[in-house]
């Protein structure tokens, strides 16, 4: 199971305060789908303003592989002006 | 200007084209007035739009009577909020509410939420008739109490701007009135960090809302035919953004909406969303004619997307030797009348260049009755970094440390974990500090009654999606099409990277900015991303072109592709009768139709691997103790720029960012009267620095290449606006012997600080 770490506020708002969620997924698509199933609306939020890092590497490609021991960090996306 | 030392950082390479300073390809059109900007474009049959704007910062719209305006000869259309899609439809198209905010900001429905809010628009055969028609529209307002400041919005009993809104970032039951969003971030143990500190500084800081001040007001021409197809010609930081937002708001299939980019006279983040374009489309549909809408300067100030004001509290502790042990930061930013949230970049940028063990950060975006704020060059970083760099300066002073040494003591190094817990990449935080320390400016004696400040600031930069098309003409010249408006020199930079990759001369490459129907998607020219991301797309396409050219040369010579090498703009044969011979790109292109047809390739990327940019700025000031007037006497900007593709443009970005930051620090602010109307919506009263106000901004490029880009590119456009607020503030504080905490440092404010007991 991959370990998904959520920002504190997002966890409070959508996931009942759980900041760490264990998810079985092969890619970031799988992570997003699993989190959407737990908290409808997460996927739209992710599309608009979140980024994810798998094992310390930021990736906006949701086909990025996720291993059973991976850590997925969900962070605020910063694009700029 | 201080020339680069010529010494390349580790990993840097010598290139043939990259790093040279060729003439900009858009220069002649721009200096001879031939370039077509937003306000220049004319469509056949075009008529003229104008917008009626609310004089009230907060009011309920009881009714709008447009009958007299419609009856005026020459008026072809009038629209109001009733012509806009309903909330439900907009939320279906964008559940996050972004389209809803853009739509309501562009044309009010039921309530006017800020001074200058559009409440109706007309299109008429002449601009004069359009203006006369506006005067005939009767709006019945119920004036409501406005909320103009962060403090007022958060006060108990304040009018609630969006009663239905639930604060994001907190549990639903913890929603806070007038707070759009909350973001918290903690690392380590702040309390333990303060316990080991030898010195602690605590202060409150604020910055005013300010405008990007781009020269060109927003302007567009829109056309929406009865068959459902539409076109928009506009200047912006992203014509795909205009297509997607207008299409999303009005429910137009994106393939039916073609947006053509016009030249842009500055944006700095303020042109990364729509303002007038949806209204122009509604007018065009009703009128059955193309409609031009253009803002006046006052409209730009009142109704576009300035940078948020901020209020912050900071507490920072450090040991005797300058190690920062803990930072608490609480920052609130004005969202404006609708939802715009810069909490993420504020917190991510606050201490980005430093490796600090203990952080406790909170950011809030707060609704107030002013135009919805938006991105300005490294959004929210200058506001947050102003507090952080002021606190570092105070601690350095308290501890008797050199302020640059204290920063070096805490600087982040590659491989260490950043704010999010991700490893720092190859960013020259330390190299920039060392370059600043080695610069003659830092050690130059100060003239009498002058003081020196220094500050550091970084910005994360971005990558993201971009498309480029490259084709080779029969004569061997190369055409590159990109989907990014050229604001800071992308045509030159793309041509240089294409020439470098193909091994040909810069003069053989011509770059155009293609419209939304002519090329694949490209994200905004924003986030310091274009040279990095679109550059990757161009290089990818050029590499495909090279593979194709090698294949065609192999066909001509009758050898395998693997026997053909590509160098210096030519194919070289490695075997057979032609071994050692070459075919230049021109020779292969001439035979294109006999070897497979046109030579063309697409590069399409979602560019990853971007790295932050960082600047260290040194500022000398003279403060007139009797008037409070601050004069910048010397200014040096040092920046890790990755590989500078075109150094002139890079230095220009550094100078421009520094000047805008100086304006932010010294002069600029939105001034509202008690009713919430902006009192200074023009450049006479909204004071931006001009050339005569400033010395030459000295630039020092530190080139530490990005290993994740073929030519080492890092974004350079945003980082230089981050340090100036702190650099100027620190210099003024040292000049008057008191910490200045509120920007802008207008003469009256500085004089008050000088005379305060």
Image: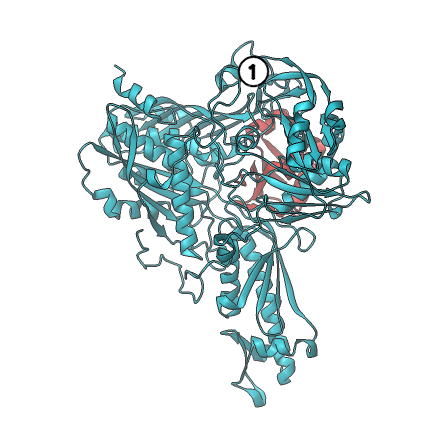
User: Hey, which residue is sitting farthest top in the picture?
Assistant: B157
Colour convention of the picture? by chain
Residue situated in front as seen by the camera: A32 or B160:
B160
Q: Secondary structure at mark 1?
A: loop
Q: How many numbered discs sit on the rendered protein?
A: 1
Task: Specify the chain shown as red.
Answer: A
Q: Is residue A33 visible?
A: no
Q: Tell me if residue B507 comes above or below residue B726 in the rendering.
A: below
User: In which chain is the residue bearing label 1?
Assistant: B
Is B165 drawn above or below residue B373 in the view shown? above
Disc 1 crowd rating (10 Å Cα; few below 14, some 14-19, many 20+) is: many
Q: Residue furthest bottom?
A: B577
Residue at (56, 9) in percent of width and height: B157
Q: Where residue B342 sits: x, y (%)?
A: 53, 32
Q: Which residue is mark 1?
A: B146
| B125 relative to B179, above or below | below
- In the picture shown, does residue B596 fall above or below A64? below
Left or right: where B253 falls relative to B392: right
Q: Is residue B463 left or right of residue B518?
A: left
Q: Is residue B168 visible?
A: yes
Residue B65 is situated, as x and y percent measured from the top left of the image, at 73, 20
Q: Which image quarter holds the C terminus of chain B?
A: top left
B71, B438: nearer the viewer: B71
Give the left or right position of residue B280, taking residue A19 as reference.
right
Picture coordinates of residue B643, whole percent (x, y): 42, 56
**Image coords of residue B216 (percent x, y):** 53, 41
Residue ID at (82%, 45%): B227
Q: In the depicted view, which residue is nearer to us: B697 or B533? A: B697
| Residue at 51% in and 12% down | B155
Could you say which chain is coloured cyan in the image?
B
Q: Residue furthest front?
A: B73
């Amino acid at each position: 199971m991959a370990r998904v770490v959520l920002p504190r506020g997002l966890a409070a708002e959508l996931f009942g305060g759980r900041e760490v969620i264990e998810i079985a997924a092969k890619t970031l698509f799988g992570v997003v789908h699993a989190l959407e199933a737990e908290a409808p609306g997460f996927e739209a939020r992710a599309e608009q303003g979140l980024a994810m890092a798998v094992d310390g590497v930021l990736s906006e490609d949701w086909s990025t592989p996720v291993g059973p021991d991976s850590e997925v960090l969900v962070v605020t996306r910063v694009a700029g002006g | 200007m201080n020339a680069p030392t010529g010494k390349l950082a580790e990993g840097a390479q010598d290139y043939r084209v990259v790093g040279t300073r060729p003439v900009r390809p858009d220069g002649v059109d721009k200096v001879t007035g031939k370039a077509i900007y937003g306000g220049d474009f004319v469509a056949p049959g075009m008529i003229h739009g104008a917008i009626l704007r609310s004089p009230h910062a907060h009011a309920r719209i009881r009714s709008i009577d447009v009958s007299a305006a419609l009856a005026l000869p020459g008026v072809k259309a009038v629209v109001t909020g009733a012509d806009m899609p309903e909330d439900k439809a907009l939320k279906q198209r964008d559940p996050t509410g972004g389209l809803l905010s853009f739509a309501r900001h562009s044309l009010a429905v039921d309530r006017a939420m800020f001074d200058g809010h559009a409440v109706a628009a007309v299109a008429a055969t002449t601009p004069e008739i359009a203006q006369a028609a506006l005067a005939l529209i009767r709006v019945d307002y119920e004036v409501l109490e406005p909320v103009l400041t962060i403090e007022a919005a958060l006060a108990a009993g304040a009018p609630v701007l969006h009663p239905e809104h639930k604060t994001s970032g907190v549990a639903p039951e913890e929603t806070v009135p007038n707070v759009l969003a909350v973001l918290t971030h903690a690392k380590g143990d702040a309390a333990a960090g303060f316990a080991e500190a030898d010195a602690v500084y605590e202060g409150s800081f604020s910055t005013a809302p300010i405008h990007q001040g781009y020269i060109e007001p927003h302007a567009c021409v829109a056309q929406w035919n009865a068959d459902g197809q539409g076109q928009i010609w506009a200047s912006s930081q992203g014509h795909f953004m205009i297509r997607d937002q207008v299409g999303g708001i009005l429910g137009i299939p994106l393939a039916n909406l073609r947006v053509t980019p016009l030249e842009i006279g500055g944006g700095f983040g303020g042109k990364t969303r729509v303002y007038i374009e949806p209204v122009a489309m509604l007018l065009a549909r009703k009128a059955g004619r193309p409609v031009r809408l253009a803002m006046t300067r006052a409209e730009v100030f009142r109704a576009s997307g300035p940078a948020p004001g901020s209020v912050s509290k900071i507490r920072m502790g450090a040991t005797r030797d300058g190690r920062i042990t803990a930072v608490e930061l609480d920052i609130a930013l004005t969202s404006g009348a609708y939802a715009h949230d810069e909490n993420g970049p504020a917190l991510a940028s606050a201490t980005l260049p430093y490796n600090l063990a203990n952080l406790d950060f909170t950011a809030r975006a707060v609704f107030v009755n002013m135009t919805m704020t938006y991105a300005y060059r490294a959004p929210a970083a200058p506001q947050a970094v102003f507090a952080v760099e002021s606190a570092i300066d105070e601690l350095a002073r308290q501890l008797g440390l050199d302020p640059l040494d204290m920063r070096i003591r805490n600087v982040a190094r590659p491989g260490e974990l950043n704010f999010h817990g991700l490893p720092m990449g190859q960013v020259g935080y330390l190299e920039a500090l060392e370059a600043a320390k080695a610069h003659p400016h830092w050690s130059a004696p100060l003239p009498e009654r002058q003081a020196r400040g220094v500050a550091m600031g970084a910005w994360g930069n971005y990558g993201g999606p971009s498309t480029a098309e490259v084709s080779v003409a029969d004569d061997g010249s190369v055409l590159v099409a990109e989907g990014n408006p050229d604001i800071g020199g992308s045509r030159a930079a793309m041509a240089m990277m294409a020439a470098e990759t193909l091994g040909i001369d810069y003069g053989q490459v011509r770059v155009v900015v293609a419209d939304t129907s002519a090329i694949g998607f490209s994200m905004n020219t924003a986030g310091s991303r274009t040279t990095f991301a679109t550059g990757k797309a161009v290089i990818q396409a050029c590499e495909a072109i090279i593979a194709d050219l090698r294949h065609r040369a192999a066909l001509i010579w009758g050898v395998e592709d693997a026997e053909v090498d590509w160098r210096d703009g030519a194919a070289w044969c490695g075997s057979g009768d032609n071994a050692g011979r070459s075919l230049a790109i021109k020779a292969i292109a001439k035979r294109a139709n006999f070897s497979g047809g046109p030579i063309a390739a697409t590069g399409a990327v979602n560019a990853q691997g971007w790295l932050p940019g960082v600047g260290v700025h040194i500022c000398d000031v003279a403060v007139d103790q009797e008037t409070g007037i601050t004069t910048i006497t010397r200014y040096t900007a040092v920046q890790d720029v990755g590989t500078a593709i075109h150094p002139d443009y890079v230095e220009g970005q550094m100078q421009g960012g520094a000047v805008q930051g100086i304006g932010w620090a010294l002069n600029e602010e939105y001034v509202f009267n008690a009713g919430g109307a902006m009192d200074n919506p023009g450049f006479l009263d909204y004071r931006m620095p001009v050339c005569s106000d400033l010395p030459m901004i000295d630039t020092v490029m530190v080139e530490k290449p990005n290993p994740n880009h073929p030519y080492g590119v890092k974004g350079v456009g945003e980082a230089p606006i981050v340090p100036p607020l702190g650099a100027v503030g620190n210099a003024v504080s040292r000049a008057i012997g008191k910490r200045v905490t509120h920007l802008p440092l207008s003469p009256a404010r500085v004089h008050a600080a000088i005379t305060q007991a």
